[in-house]
Amino acid sequence: MKKIAIFLAVLMVISSLALCACDQPGVKPAGKTSGGEKNTQGTDQTTAQPKSSEENKDLFYGYEKLPALDSVDGFELKVYSRGKESGYNAWLTVDLVAEELLDEPINDAVYTRNEILKDKYGFTIVDVPSPKDQAVQAMAEIKAGGEAFDLIIADGEKSAALGEGGYLLNLYEVPYLQLEAPWWDPHAAPNLSIGGKLYFTTGDLSISANDATWITAFNKQVQEEHNVEDLYKLVKENKWTIDKVDEITKSISSDLNDDGRFDNKDIYGYVYEPFNGYALFYSLGCSIITKDENDYPSLSVFSTESQSIFETIRQISDDDANYYQGWSGDCTSIIKDNRALLTSTTMFTVRANYRKWEQDFGILPMPKLAADQNYVDVVSTATCGSLYSIPTSSEDRVETVGYCLEALARESKETLREAYYDVALTGVLFRDNDSSEMLDIILANRYFDLAIIYNWGDWYKYFYNLWQTKASNFSSTYDSKKDMTEKAIQTTIDKYIENN
């Protein structure tokens, strides 16, 4: 308990000094505008939520504290997680339970949070690791009306299958959940709901969706060797655009071994993974779908502007002499060997690999098209980032489960969130204050995409495979996919409507 007290004291000091990214007000990302239309709304990086107990001991970040609930005392909250047998590999659930303090930020924050939940509210968390075919197994258990688990942690695809199939509760109707509060992600609920129904979301209770956020990283040694201008300053001055990226990239790339061809042994301004084409489509101001006034999605992928942006992405994908595209391990090796300045990847790759390196690096948001747009960083939630949901089999105890889920999210704010952002990342991983500020900008402008989660019309795979389909045409592709995509979207909408 002495270790716990010391750990909490450290977190409280860090919390008082650091800007809370999750306290940023929600901003409508460029990906939410229609058909590639530019979003000119600026991002307010200065507004913060009230401090928890510092300003009012009866409030927690401006919200009333949870009242006592008799049914919670002694309750075991069983959570169906992404276990070792589920095949998730890097995306296993690592932020749910911890057996002891290990002097490791994430583990110790989880341990501390769970001790608080037990002492303050009276319930404990039980990890129920899933086998393979998590959604199929969950459906069978829910159909049987069993009580094997109260909550589900799954990726976007499996969460979507459960939600569309009527196996999940509408979180907007669950007692005690305050989804507009700062411990819940401000972008997840509005991005992931359909027709006013929200079946899955995320927040400070999980590091996985943060890990799945797509960002730009850069090697400071390469920056210095090539006299590249201040990249942080470009972001702050709204000059971190795709044209600037292209200019910098072409000033660095070269055939290092003079063999007359470009491969993973050369020097590049920019190396990236296949998901980059999809992430750029959003960061440059486009989207596959938008929502109407009733919260229903519709196809918006094609317009004059989105066609122009696609051609920009196409040029990058086809430019093998300046841009290198490969899988994560390949790109990571190139930038580690100081043979690339920029790379686009997930925060997980940065957190899992870059922190071990001797050379300095930094992070940036994905580039935008023009200065008057927001920065937008899409979250890879199809098979990577985790989402939380409540199965319909928990309906008879939904008040207790909802209370526990809300408490879990609340108490993660000053434990798990602080460990992830301030200790594991800004205090250990990043070696300058500017990268911390970049992380704030990234997390204040994220986008969760229903189109990738439900894979309507296979658009995700289309952008993902651009490097292997150099002859593809955006206009003709749209013509061939339009009816199929609209039908798939409508099918999902119909199923949501059926799920009363």
Image: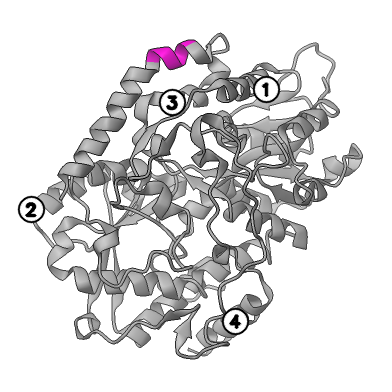
**Which residue is label 1 attached to?**
316
Residue lying farthest to the front in this orientation: 293
Dot 2 amino acid type: Ala
Magenta span includes 34 = no
Q: Gap between marks 3 and 4, in whole Å?
A: 44 Å
Q: Are marks 2 and 4 in contact (CB under 8 Å)?
A: no
Is any part of residue 32 visible from this angle?
A: yes
The magenta stretch spans which residues? 476-480
| Residue 9 appears left or right of 124 | right
Is most of the magenta stretch helix, strand or loop? helix
Residue position marked by numbered label 4 in the rendering: 12
* Marks 1 and 3 close (CB-CB < 8 Å): no
The amino acid type, in three-letter code, at marker 1 is Ile
First reached walking from the N terminus: tag 3 or tag 4: 4
Q: Position of residue 402 (x, y in %)?
A: 27, 69
Q: Residue at x 46, y 71 (%)?
A: 412
Mark 3 — residue? 459
Q: Which mark is residue 144?
A: 2
Badge 2 marks a residue whose secondary structure is loop
Callout 4 environment at 10 Å: few (<14), some (14 to 19), or many (20+)? some
* Image marks 2 and 1: residues in contact by CB distance under 8 Å: no
